[in-house]
Amino acid sequence: MLHSLMGFLLAASLGQGHAAAPSLDIATEESPPASMVDGRTVIGSSTAKVREIMARSGLRYRIDLLPWKRAYTSALRRDNGCVYSTTRTPEREHLFHWIGPLDEAEWVLLARADRGYQFKTLEDARGLRIGTYNGDAREEYLRSRGFNIDSANNDLINPRKLLLNRIDLWAASLRRGSYVLEQNDWSSRIVPVFTFRKVQVYLACNKRVPAATAIRMQGARDAMERDGTSRRIERKYEAWEKHKAKAP
């Protein structure tokens, strides 16, 4: 009888803990192939991973596509807020629970092909106008080191500014399977000149999200890595990107 009562209380406790898990307000930006809109639905490689994490964790959620600064700020201010794909830096470490990594990326300086830049170190870019965008980790990184930053509200404004000679370099984040240059017919006019950092990106959740919820989400992500789900999602979107890059 005592064992039955203890079992009932434990089950009730677990059920209450599950019910108490918050519904998460998740924000992201337009950043193909990781996150983008198809009709009214947010899709993409990182989006698919986040949705799978939520499903495996048994959590309620919504995903909104917002400008990056607004997406990032909403995660900082909302008790149930999360944001992806967020670069994990020492400066941000204490601000969030970090679930991931979802993906890897290279921070790359790109220039007009006709400039002929040949950089050996990041210092070779000092004094040049570098296009970044508001609230991004690359902007924080370069600004803190005293580089000449020209900030935009949207990252895809920068290649257009570059082609118009309004900036000298574009500090972009290129991910696995990214065909952004080919898709926009920029590959013959804009070229990478220096990779200055390799990073990992995460789903970052407000510190007021219960730690137990973040641990459950991380466990789901780790299981996806072990059973091959993450790689299957990546292959799906790599094929999608290649197809789109070849489309007339």
Image (tube, rainbow, N blue to C red):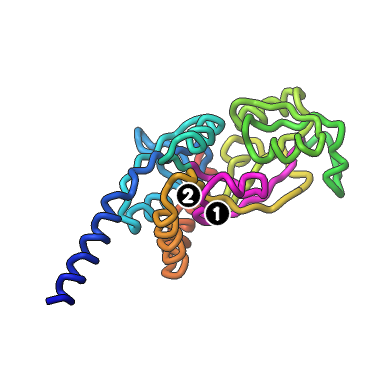
Q: Say whether disc 1 or disc 2 marks the residue closer to the N-terminus.
A: 2
Amino acid type, residue under disc 2 in the picture = Ser
Residue 86: x %, y % from top left: 56, 45
Give the left or right position of residue 130, taking residue 116 as reference: left
Residue at the limit of the structure toward the front, as seen here: 2
Q: Could you tell me residue 68's position as x and y percent?
A: 54, 33
Q: Which residue is drawn at the image coordinates 29% and 55% (left, top)?
A: 18
21 on left or right of 111? left
Q: Main secondary structure of the magenta part?
A: strand
Q: Are marks 1 and 2 in contact (CB under 8 Å)?
A: yes
- Start-end of magenta stretch: 83-111
Q: CA distance from mark 1 to mark 2?
A: 7 Å
Q: Quadrant of the N terminus?
A: bottom left
154 displayed left or right of 16? right
Residue displayed at 70% across by 37% down: 140
Q: Which residue is mark 1?
A: 103
Which residue in the structure is indicated by mark 2?
A: 46
Q: Is residue 174 above or below residue 73?
A: below
Residue type at tag 1 = Asp
